[in-house]
Amino acid sequence: MEIEMQVRTAIRDAVNLASRKPFYWGGLKGYQQLEAIAEVLCQIPGTSVENDFFQRLIRQVKRTLEQNRALAREMQQAHTWLCKVAACLRFPPSSYPEDEWQTLSSQQVAHDVESLLEQLRQEAKNKRILSRFYAALRGRWLAYGSELLHCYNIPGLPPDNLQLEGFFNRLRCHQRRVSGRKSTKELRDFGQFQALFAADSQTDLLEQLRRVPMAEYQKHRQRLAKSETSRRFLYRLHRDPQKTISHLLDRYAERQCELERNSWLVITLPFLCTV
């Protein structure tokens, strides 16, 4: 049942998993992931009796896709407008040449965004998702728009704090691995340094590492790999859902062939004994 459970996990991940990022799992990205899963499931060889579990699963997935198709289409339109907003803000900066950034001014960016908001207002009429997207975008622009424009006037000022957040996120993950605790409140006071080993020389450090028995190390290493299995599966699923589900179904087909060979042996061996 491991393969069947992983397929169900992939479907639940596409339908139920929320995300802080817009249009990701639980939204447009989840719908696209579910479409890729359905496409692979529809290609399962064999009769419906042999794959009864997957046949029932396909019907449920298709029903979910059909019920949310119109909603996903509007979400795709909203995502297209979000990309247009990012293009007006020249985000991310790495996608645009430095010459364009040097000649860019906050007044020009503000004018481009205002023009885009007016176009979106006209496009969003009688469209529920686009109307809500326009209202949220306009509210945030009126509240925080002026604070986003300083980076176009001050050379070297980054337009976001993603690098700083990424740095502290790596610190938190490192703290959890070292201490084994979920809480990372200590980083508020001691985030500027972390001590892993206290050694006077490389020889002393190597001696400390050798004190850990190899069998004990292997045991904990296997436990760590086992605990990371579900996370790695979801990571592969998010990067390429079609290839991941295809790999699972290939394993399922191999298991079916193995079960058929074993059942043939079970039937054949009593017959040979009687002869």
Image (spheres, grey):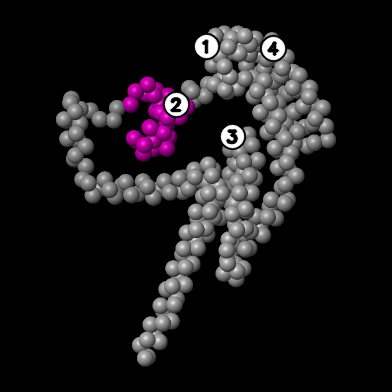
Alpha carbon of mark 3 to alpha carbon of mark 4: how far?
A: 30 Å
Residue that carries the numbered disc 3 in the rendered image: 20
Label whose residue precedes the other's in the sequence (2 or 4): 4
Alpha carbon of mark 2 to alpha carbon of mark 3: how far?
A: 18 Å
Labels 1 and 2 touching (C-beta < 8 A): no
**Label for residue 168?**
2
Does 212 sit above or below residue 104?
A: below
Q: Is mark 2 on a helix, strand or loop?
A: helix
Residue shown at 58% from the left, 44% from the top: 17
In the rendered image, residue 196, in percent from the top left (x then y), is placed at 29, 30
Identity of the amino acid at label 2?
Phe
Residue that carries the numbered disc 1 in the rendered image: 156
Closer to the observer: label 1 or label 3?
A: 1
Labels 1 and 4 touching (C-beta < 8 A): no
Looking at this view, is 165 or 254 the one in front? 254
Label whose residue precedes the other's in the sequence (2 or 3): 3
Identity of the amino acid at label 3?
Arg
Looking at this view, is 275 or 185 the one in front? 275
Alpha carbon of mark 1 to alpha carbon of mark 4: how far?
A: 19 Å
Identity of the amino acid at label 1?
Gly
Residue that carries the numbered disc 4 in the rendered image: 108
Q: In this view, does 142 lie to the left or right of 236?
A: right
Does 192 sit above or below residue 44?
A: above
| 172 in magenta | yes
Labels 2 and 3 touching (C-beta < 8 A): no
Which class describes the residues within 10 Å of circle 1: few (<14), some (14-19), or many (20+)?
few
Residue shown at 65% from the left, 9% from the top: 105
Specify the segment rendered in magenta.
166-194
